[in-house]
Amino acid sequence: MNNRTRLLLWSAMMIVAGLWLAWAAGSRLSFETDIKAMLPQTTPDAVTRHALKQVDAILGRRSLYLIGAPDFATADSAAQAFIATLRASPAYADARFTHAPSHAEFAQLYGDAQRLLLTDRDRHQLEQRGAQAYADAEWQRLYSPEVLTRTQAFASDPLQLYGHYLAQLAPAGGALTARDGKFVLERDDGIDLLVSVTLADSPYRLDLQKEAIPPLRSAIDAARAVSPSVTLIGSGVLRRAAATSERIRLEIIVIGGLSLTGVLLVFMFCFRSPRPLLLVLLSLSAAMLVSLATVATVYGRIHIVALVFEACVVGLATDYSILLFSDRYRDAQPWNGRLGLRRIGRSIGVAMASMLLAYASFLVPASAGLRQMALLSISGLVAAYLTVVLIYPVLLGTPAPAAPAIAAWRDRLGRLRAPRRPTLALLFAAGGILLIVGGQRLRFIDDVRALRTEPPALLSEESLVRERLGTVTDTRFFLVEGRDIEALLQNEETLRGRLDVLLQRHVLGDYRALSQFVPSAQRQRDDAALLAKTVYADGSPLATLQARLGFPAQAFAQQQAAFEAARATHIDLATALNSPLGPRLRDLWLGKTGHGVASLVLIGGVADDGALSSAAAGLPDVRLIDRDADASQVLQHYRHLALFGLGGALLLIALLLTMRYGMGAGLRLMAVPFGSGLLTLATLGAFDVPATLFTVLALMLVVGLGVDNAVFLYENRDARPMALLATSIAALVSLFGFGLLSASATPFVHSLGLGVLLGTLYSWLLAVLVTAAPRQPSPAP
């Protein structure tokens, strides 16, 4: 193939990939930062997926802010400024005061049926002791200042049973009160107003973070501009996700800058020309372009974890370039790119084929994240390899003269021989001890929460919000189903009976359920029958109380008539959803499903995970959904799959190497990737560093390094000094390029970087040892 054909073929590939990526970037390509998004769905159940989506909208897109000041007027003005600024931004779907439902809104929903509503506590009291205690308490209350606190007239709620019912609907566990229709929190040094903010889309989307954070900062500034005394604290995913994205961006700049500087110094020192570095950047650019275009075609949305992994894989593909550039140090003969490619083309071809087999194993699991990693890596490796074999011979030109220092380094490396037997025995013993000690201490962490790092300042702020409010909605929730609305409400009421016990034990702070607002029809009938028997029967304690208060005899008859009229009414869910209280209830309503209807029961202030799990035990239509726990189980499952995939990849590579080099040589070469992976894990265990799924992914990179080093050294054993020099330069570039990722504060990036750092060192050492020329016997005296 002549140079023109090579150039045209490569250019056509890049133009097609570039145009396709440009279209995708403008129409469908986006990046995902939520660590859970890269995992497969924890369940294929459509109802659960709907519930998770709705909870994400409630918890993920919504944030709560407490805007405070020494007095109500100042706090209200600051909150108004905050809300107005956010409402002007398209990144926010809504910003509003949270307000307590008014008595008029409840009256519109319940109407005459308010006479039929009982709390669980009142119901139990009436069943056990009748209404006498309520009548006695009301007699005392009517002749005390407490009478001023009544929310309903005596005629409509004589024993305050309806008032008790409304009181139980107020948020539990906190100090929120209503003022001018807004939820406020009284403090010793001032007052807070509670503001709810809803995003237009997921807070994990990078493009939305860029759109939402500047208006939020402006809104905070607008609130604080009202008065220097204004305070503002908040909770929610947006700021934490944006802070994480910003930290990753800064790490890319700092660590990436240090890596690039190190790589630049290595290239300039070893090859004495910027052209090799520019060609490597061309190879990396081609790999990224093709891989992004490929994944954009298949998925549209790319997870940042997959992108980081692919960047590492493609970065390790620079080995192909370095091995080619280093071939110039083979001998003193004139050298060009075509000659170098003829000499090393076979070895890098075998190495690439081995890695394609390895990464293909990631296409098997039903995980979009793992498949993205595989697809990005495979397409990126192929593009990098094709760039080396097609373009490098055309663009490489005549290299600069070899650096004397590098030539001297090559000669020193060339004098390395197999260690003496005592030294080799010592190395084996040290490795064996490390494997035993490290293997015993090695531990894996699969908790998805351990993969998140969030700014302490924001966590402290959220903790303060939780402390002031008493509780905030948990990410866990109960999913309740029923064959119809009546069965659903009854199932909720059964669950609520258990949750009330947890409230009394103070292991649960609060919960929200539809059946708190809309009792089941059976509950309404049962309560009406109980009230008819204990409160509105002839001669009841209520009749006696009215007589003591001087009401005419017909007054109690009117109460009985009003009660009987109320018994003919019914509170139904459809009416409630379309009432002024509807927005509060629609968050909990999932609607029709394939086998009935479903709803959510949201919880907060969980102090005992075991007790919470037991609340749904024995209730076939109730499930506790713990997305973090489910994701952690899936993370563990896919760590196991990744380990099996890694084992399968090693077997495939071993098969390829034994077919290519024979049983003895192939297995000896396999000792490099296999041993470097084991030693990497053992080192982590020895130093009590926990391993994760991303450590296993790093081992895939380690396998690639090991195969590259072993194959290249074996294929070029007749030019061992050059081969040792090439693998040493490649190892240095890997340490600078990817080992520095171990300094990242982002857990998954740190795990990848640390694994690559250790694997680079071990794979180089093992490759040198395994392929070392035998030591010549000392001449006889």
Image (cartoon, grey):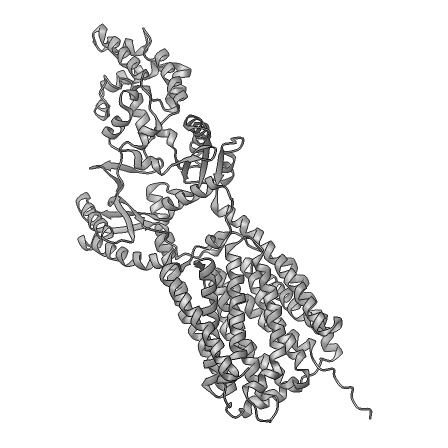
Give the x, y percent position of residue 306.
49, 61
Question: Residue at the spot x=45%, y=65% of the render?
Answer: 292
Q: Quadrant of residue 228?
A: bottom left
Residue 133 versus residue 342 in the image, above or below: above
Question: Residue at the spot x=45%, y=81% of the render?
Answer: 278
Q: Quadrant of residue 772?
A: bottom right
Quarter placement of the C terminus: bottom right
Give the x, y percent position of residue 490.
44, 26
Residue 335 versus residue 290 in the image, above or below: below
Q: Is residue 651 left or right of residue 688?
A: right
Give the x, y percent position of residue 518.
35, 27
The foreground one among 5 and 124 is 5
Give the x, y percent position of residue 464.
34, 48
Q: Is residue 253 left or right of residue 84?
A: right
Residue 739 visible within the image: no
Question: Residue at the spot x=21%, y=52% of the render?
Answer: 229
Q: Is residue 137 left or right of residue 304?
A: left
